[in-house]
C-alpha cells in the first residue's frame, strides 16, 4: 500500500513509519520543512495547506498531528494552539482526501473525548463528555468526518489513550520523578487512566488499516487502571517505591484546568472495536506495558 503519514516525527508517527516501511508499504511523509527526500511532501496547513495532487495514488492517509496536550498550563492562548494544531491540519487533509480521491483517512483523536467518566466504563458507542478535552476532540473528529463519503471515502477516528513508551510521552515526564523516589498518586488516586504500549498502539493502527475498520476506535489497553494502581505498578517497574500523595488542591493550584481534566479526572475506556475484532495485545496488562517501557521485559529501554 501507498500510505501518506502526517505527524510522522512524533512519538507514534516515528514508530508507525518504521513499522509500515518494514512491512513493505510505501510510506510518504508530510513535512513542514523543505523536503530533503523523495518520500516527503511539503505542506503548511496553517497557510497554503497542501497540493492535493501530490497525494494522488495514495491508498490511505494517516493523520497524527497535534501539539502535546499536557506540556503546558492551559492558558487561553495555549488552548487555542492545541485546537488549531489538531483541527486545522485535519480539515486540510480531509479536503485533500476528497479532492485526491483517496479511499481511507485514519485520523487521530483521543480518549479525552469521553470527558471524566468516573468508574463508568465507556466504549466507542458512548457519547462525548464535557470539558475542554471533550469539546476539542468532538470538533477534531467533526473535521475528520467531513472527508467521509459512503462508498468513496472512509474515515476512522483513532481515540488514542496515553502511550507507555521507553522514551517520551507521559512516562518521559514521570520517569525522572519516580527515579528520584518522588513518585506519587494524584489526589485520591481513584481516577481511571486508559493506557497502551507504543508497540500495541502502532500494531492497532496497522490492524485497523488492514481490516478497513471505520468509525471510532478506542486505541487503548484491554482494561483501564486507577491512578493508584498505575503509580504502584510504575514504581515497582523502576524498583522505586511511590508512597507519596499529591493533594488535589495542590495540583489545581499548580496546573489549573489541566489538572482538573488530565490529572484528577479520567476515563474508564473499553476497546470494544479492537477486542471485538480479535486484536491480540503484545502487552495486555499495565504491568506488561510498563515492563516494556522500562526495559524490564528485555526489549524496552533501560529504566
Image (cartoon, rainbow, N blue to C red):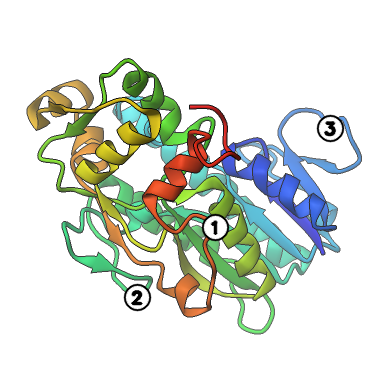
Q: Nearer the viewer, residue 36 or 241?
A: 241
Q: Secondary structure at mark 2?
A: loop
Quick check: 288 above or below 207? above
Q: Secondary structure at mark 1?
A: loop
- Count neighbours of disc 1 (C-alpha within 10 A) and say few if under 14, some if 14 to 19, many if 20 or more: some
The part of the image, by quadrant, that contains residue 263 is: top left
Residue 282 — which label?
A: 1
Question: Left or right of 297: which side holds 55?
Answer: right
Residue 136 — which label?
A: none
| Residue under label 2 | 125
Q: Earlier in the sequence, mark 1 or mark 3?
A: 3
Question: Left or right of 9: which side holds 258?
Answer: left
Q: Nearer the viewer, residue 281 or 38?
A: 281
Q: Residue furthest bottom?
A: 151
Q: Residue 70, how many percent across, how many down?
A: 37, 33
Question: Residue at 65% across / 62% down in the picture?
Answer: 206
Q: Nearer the viewer, mark 3 or mark 2?
A: 2
Q: Residue 253, how many percent across, how many down?
A: 13, 23
Q: CA distance from mark 3 to mark 2?
A: 41 Å
Q: Secondary structure at mark 3?
A: loop
Q: Nearer the viewer, mark 1 or mark 2?
A: 1
| Residue under label 3 | 35
Q: Earlier in the sequence, mark 3 or mark 2?
A: 3
The part of the image, by quadrant, that contains residue 153 is: bottom right
Q: Nearer the viewer, residue 242 or 266?
A: 242
Q: CA distance from mark 1 to mark 3?
A: 35 Å
Q: Residue 174, how many percent across, how many down?
A: 36, 27
Q: Is residue 163 visible?
A: no
Q: Residue furthest top?
A: 180
Q: Nearer the viewer, mark 1 or mark 3?
A: 1
Amino acid at each position: 500500500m501507498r500510505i501518506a503519514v502526517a505527524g510522522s516525527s512524533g512519538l507514534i508517527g516515528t514508530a508507525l513509519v518504521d513499522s509500515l516501511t518494514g512491512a513493505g508499504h510505501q510510506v510518504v511523509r508530510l513535512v513542514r520543512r523543505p523536503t530533503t527526500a523523495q518520500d516527503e511532501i511539503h505542506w503548511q496547513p496553517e497557510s497554503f495547506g497542501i497540493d492535493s495532487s501530490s497525494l494522488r495514488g495514495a491508498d490511505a492517509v494517516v493523520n497524527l498531528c497535534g501539539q502535546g496536550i499536557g506540556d503546558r498550563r492551559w492558558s487561553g492562548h495555549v488552548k487555542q494552539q492545541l485546537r488549531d494544531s489538531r483541527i486545522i491540519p485535519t480539515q486540510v487533509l480531509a479536503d485533500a482526501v476528497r479532492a485526491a480521491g483517496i479511499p481511507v483517512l485514519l485520523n487521530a483523536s483521543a480518549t479525552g473525548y469521553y470527558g471524566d467518566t468516573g468508574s463508568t466504563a465507556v466504549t466507542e458507542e458512548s457519547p462525548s463528555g464535557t470539558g475542554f478535552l471533550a469539546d476539542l476532540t468532538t470538533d477534531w473528529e467533526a473535521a475528520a468526518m467531513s472527508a467521509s463519503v459512503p462508498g468513496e471515502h472512509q474515515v476512522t477516528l483513532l481515540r488514542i489513550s496515553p502511550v507507555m513508551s521507553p522514551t517520551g510521552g507521559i512516562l518521559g515526564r514521570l520517569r525522572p520523578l519516580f527515579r528520584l523516589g518522588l513518585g506519587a498518586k494524584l489526589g485520591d488516586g481513584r481516577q481511571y487512566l486508559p493506557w497502551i504500549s507504543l508497540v500495541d498502539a502502532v500494531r492497532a493502527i496497522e490492524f485497523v488499516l488492514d481490516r478497513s475498520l471505520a468509525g471510532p476506535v478506542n486505541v487503548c489497553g484491554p482494561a483501564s487502571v486507577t491512578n493508584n494502581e498505575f503509580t504502584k505498578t510504575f514504581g515497582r517497574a523502576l524498583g522505586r517505591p511511590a508512597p507519596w500523595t499529591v493533594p488535589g488542591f495542590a495540583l489545581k493550584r499548580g496546573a489549573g484546568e489541566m489538572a482538573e481534566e488530565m490529572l484528577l479526572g479520567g476515563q474508564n475506556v473499553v476497546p470494544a472495536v479492537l477486542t471485538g475484532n480479535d486484536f491480540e495485545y503484545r502487552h495486555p496488562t499495565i504491568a506488561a506495558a510498563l515492563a516494556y517501557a522500562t526495559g524490564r521485559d528485555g526489549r524496552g529501554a533501560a529504566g
